[in-house]
Amino acid sequence: MRYLLKPRALLSLALLLAVLFGLAGAQQMRLFERGWFAVQEWRHAPEWRERSLWLPDFRVDIEAQPIVGLTDNLSALTFDPDRRSLFAVTNKQAELLELSLDGQIVRRIPLTGFGDAEAVEYISPGIYVISDERQQRLFKVHVDARTRWLDAADSEQLSLSIGEDSNNGFEGLAYDSVGRRLFVAKERKPLRILQVLGFPQQSEGQPFALHVQGDAVRDQRLFVSDLSSLMFDQGSGHLLLLSDESHLVLELDQAGKPISSLSLVAGMHGLKRSVPQAEGLAMDDQGDLYIVSEPNLFYRFKKPGGE
């Protein structure tokens, strides 16, 4: 006991504890796996660049631009190719927002009965899905130029139970229009991505056939701390993930393997400051990448040589 009380021994013990806590924290943040991926990304760049979106090539074009007229609770993002605009949601004083491609509010549609709206996804002309994080529900809604408000009671709904923690529920949606697959991201505890077939229904009046499946192997190799948003690229068949806590956008190939990334930390991809609380991710039909962060910041990334 006397030996342990000596200053040198106490210092050694403190250093040992600091190292152990550091290693535990690094493991929790998946830093070792992320570092190994960075090496693999560099090694396979020539091969992977040819068959992917290749996120390392993107550079910020609009950085941290405040969305005028909005002060709080911005979440999610999706691109509407018919209107060539973006849609997002707010979850307090819930609204569906239409944004221009340079981050200006085009219109605001009040939402009634949608609970804690956290994600929105374009499905087909005039059709969207909105998620309720806490009650883990999905709503199919119709939106056109005449829409002035949306009531959940008028929508087709689906409830899914993927965990008891209602505050870590549905944080992201993405849709594969060819395979008719809706991807649903659970934020954490545990982090999961589900694939839903049969919702939303393509034709009303048809028999309702629902199939939900996960991919535990894919989910376990995701070296991010949380999931904030999803985006499916129809051309490559790849899925993009946005992680707020990890400050990262990650590209998965068709097998669910990470192949490229975009860091949201200051000094990377032309960013002057790190992106705070990134909540929404979308890509338009020209290949430009958009991110929104809570409460109201707008970002656009382009590849060099793009218009």
Image (spheres, grey):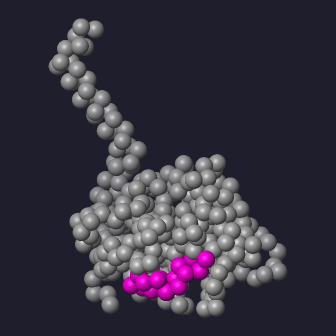
Quadrant location of the N terminus in the rendered image: top left
Q: Is residue 222 visible?
A: yes
| Residue drawn at the location 22% of the way across and 10% of the way down | 3
From the viewer's perspective, tell me whether residue 259 is left or right of residue 107. left
Q: Is residue 232 visible?
A: no
Please say whether residue 8 is one of the residues in the magenta stretch: no
The image quadrant that residue 113 belongs to is: bottom right
Q: Nearer the viewer, residue 43 or 178?
A: 178
| Residue drawn at the location 33% of the way across and 38% of the way down | 23
Please say whether residue 107 is one of the residues in the magenta stretch: yes
| Residue drawn at the location 34% of the way across and 57% of the way down | 37
- The magenta-colored residue range is 96-110
Can you give x and y, in whole percent of width and height, for residue 177 in the image?
60, 80
| Residue drawn at the location 72% of the way across and 66% of the way down | 158
Can you give x and y, in whole percent of width and height, for residue 267 in the image?
23, 65
Can you give x and y, in whole percent of width and height, for residue 155 in the image?
73, 75
